[in-house]
């Protein structure tokens, strides 16, 4: 039997499905068939023998696949059979490749995925700086259809060179770190046990940024305020209202990290128990959960005044135009710089308050270990990271009392 368009079109459903076979073609080339379902659906397929086993492979439904197209597909399958290739294996491989291509993410999508990956793992300030750098220094220079494996080491060097060449050496080093971590994230994801036997969505086999390096001197900050300067800051009457209160609170709280205090909410201050609870989402060292800081006596009137003037959402340092958000830290820096210049005091930054407290607490004879616990400095030894879950609140309270007694001596 040789199929015709008119014959195929006129086929009607029966009580049971049935199959018609076209009898043209040579030995070992397979036979074109059409199967008619009881519903009237007509499906093309090819029946063939491979390794002494009878097999079939579907070609699609009629009329989406017409007779001419079905014969072309049959001819392709015949060539595969004559070459000793199983058409089913070829089809499975094609489906696998198609699935892999459909699943593969572009380089720009990888950058988006990496930013989502960061959210529960790092502090908001790191998320913001990473997002800003990616959008400004990576996205505009990466083609929208580029896949991660297509980004070469020279492409990566070019991205970094644009930053390095404008003299922003630290930012270039940060960009290198981000890009290296982006590729590490891609490699780790595709190689994770959860993705075993699944198509790679990034397709990155090696980290092309790993071997790109350049020296950027990491000079530790040296500025810290003397006892006299702490006194000047405490009694300054020409600093902006909230800037002044922030500086006093930062000193009273033993130099906690800027965003941990400046982005705080009134609900985080337990004035009855005299504890500030800095949530894990805002602390830098996340493996220990929330950071608990005892509130010393000098901090109480400062906190009460800030709570009295808090924003609509409870922020102690609210944004002027966005009540639900905290004010920008850059405003804090500018106000401090302006005040220092007016009084001919060597400039300092909000971050220098942390160094000041660390230094003066040593002068107040608070041990280095307790100072580290109070300021939540990272402890990387196995005991601390994996086993020590003691909150050290008793030791921190004693240290805070000792610190405030010292502050009272230098302020009055």
Image (spheres, helix red, strand yellow):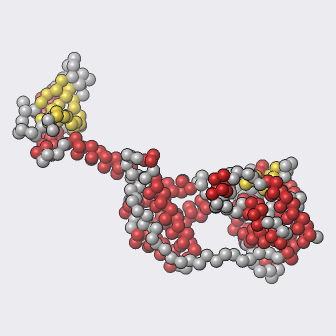
| Residue plotted at (40% across, 72% down) | 154
Residue 161 shown left or right of residue 337 in the figure: left
| Residue plotted at (22% across, 41% down) | 88
Residue 412 placement (x, y as % from top left): 94, 70
Displayed quadrant of residue 300:
bottom right
Up the image or down, 68 lies above or below 200; here it is above
Residue 185 shown left or right of residue 64 in the figure: right
**The one of 371 and 145 positioned closer to us in this rendering:** 371
Residue 99 shown left or right of residue 397 in the figure: left
Q: Quadrant of the N terminus?
A: top left
Residue 203 shown left or right of residue 20 in the figure: right
Residue 72 placement (x, y as % from top left): 15, 43
Q: Is residue 261 visible?
A: yes
Residue 66 placement (x, y as % from top left): 18, 37
How many numbered marks have been drawn onto this rendered protein structure?
Answer: 0
| Residue plotted at (54% across, 54% down) | 117
């Amino acid at each position: 039997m040789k199929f015709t368009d008119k014959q195929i079109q006129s086929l009607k459903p029966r009580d049971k499905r049935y199959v018609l076979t076209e009898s043209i073609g040579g030995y070992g080339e397979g036979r074109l068939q059409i199967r008619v379902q009881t519903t009237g659906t007509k499906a093309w397929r090819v029946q063939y023998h491979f390794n002494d086993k009878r097999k079939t492979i579907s070609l699609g439904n009629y009329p989406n696949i017409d007779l001419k197209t079905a014969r072309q597909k049959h001819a392709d399958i015949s060539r595969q059979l004559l070459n000793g290739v199983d058409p089913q294996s070829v089809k499975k491989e094609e489906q696998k490749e198609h699935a892999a291509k459909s699943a593969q993410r572009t380089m720009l999508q990888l950058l988006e995925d990496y930013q989502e990956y960061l959210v529960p793992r790092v502090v908001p300030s790191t998320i913001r700086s990473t997002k800003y750098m990616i959008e400004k220094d990576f996205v505009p220079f990466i083609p929208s259809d580029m896949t991660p494996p297509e980004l070469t080491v020279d492409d990566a060097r070019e991205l970094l060179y644009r930053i390095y060449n404008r003299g922003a050496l630290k930012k270039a080093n940060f960009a290198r770190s981000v890009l290296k971590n982006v590729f590490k994230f891609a490699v780790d994801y595709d190689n994770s046990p959860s993705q075993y036997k699944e198509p790679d969505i990034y397709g990155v086999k090696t980290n092309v940024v790993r071997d790109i390096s350049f020296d950027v001197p990491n000079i530790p900050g040296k500025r810290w305020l003397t006892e006299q300067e702490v006194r000047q800051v405490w009694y300054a009457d020409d600093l902006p209202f909230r800037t002044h209160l922030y500086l006093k609170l930062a000193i009273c709280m033993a130099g906690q990290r800027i965003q941990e205090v400046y982005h705080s909410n009134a609900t985080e201050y337990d004035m009855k128990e005299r504890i500030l609870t800095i949530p894990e989402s805002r602390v830098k060292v996340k493996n220990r959960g929330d950071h608990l800081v005892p509130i010393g006596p000098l901090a109480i009137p400062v906190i009460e005044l800030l709570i009295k003037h808090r924003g609509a959402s409870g922020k102690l340092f609210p944004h002027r135009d966005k009540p639900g958000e905290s004010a920008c830290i850059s405003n804090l820096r500018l106000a401090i710089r302006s005040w220092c210049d007016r009084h001919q005091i060597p400039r300092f930054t909000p971050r220098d308050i942390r160094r000041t407290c660390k230094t003066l607490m040593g002068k107040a004879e608070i041990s280095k270990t307790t100072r580290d616990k109070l300021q939540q400095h990272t402890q990387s030894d196995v005991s601390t990271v994996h086993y020590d879950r003691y909150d050290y609140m008793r030791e921190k309270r004693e240290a805070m009392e000792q610190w405030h007694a010292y502050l009272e001596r230098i302020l009055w």
